[in-house]
Image (tube, helix red, strand yellow):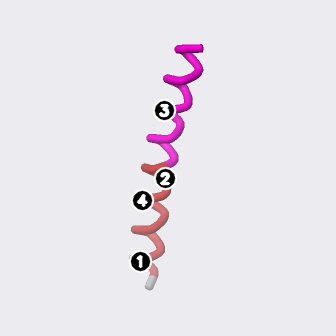
Amino acid sequence: MVTLLAESARRSRGFEALFQIFVDSSGQEN
């Protein structure tokens, strides 16, 4: 159960990082 939560947290953290990069790219374009 704990490993599942850790895996989920890791995934959402990676997704958040990708989203942050995407937002930064959009911000630079504008």
Magenta highlight: main SS? helix
| The magenta segment | 16-30
Q: How many callouts does the rendering have?
A: 4
Q: Earlier in the sequence, mark 1 or mark 2?
A: 1
Mark-to-mark CA distance, 1 and 2: 14 Å
Q: Nearer the viewer, residue 9 or 30?
A: 30
Mark-to-mark CA distance, 4 and 1: 11 Å
Residue 24 on the magenta span: yes
| Cβ atoms at labels 2 and 4 below 8 Å apart | yes
> Would you name the residue on which mark 2 appears?
13
| SS type, badge 1 | helix
Q: The N terminus lies in which quarter of the figure?
A: bottom left
Q: Earlier in the sequence, mark 3 or mark 1?
A: 1
Mark-to-mark CA distance, 3 and 1: 27 Å
Structural crowding at the residue carrying mark 4, measured as other residues with C-alpha within 10 Å and reported as few (<14), some (14–19) or many (≥20)? few
Dividing the picture into quarters, in which one does residue 18 lie?
top left
Identity, as a three-letter code, of the amino acid under mark 3: Phe
Q: Residue at x 49, y 63 (%)?
A: 9
> Would you name the residue on which mark 4 appears?
11
Identity, as a three-letter code, of the amino acid under mark 2: Arg
> Would you name the residue on which mark 3 appears?
22
Identity, as a three-letter code, of the amino acid under mark 4: Arg
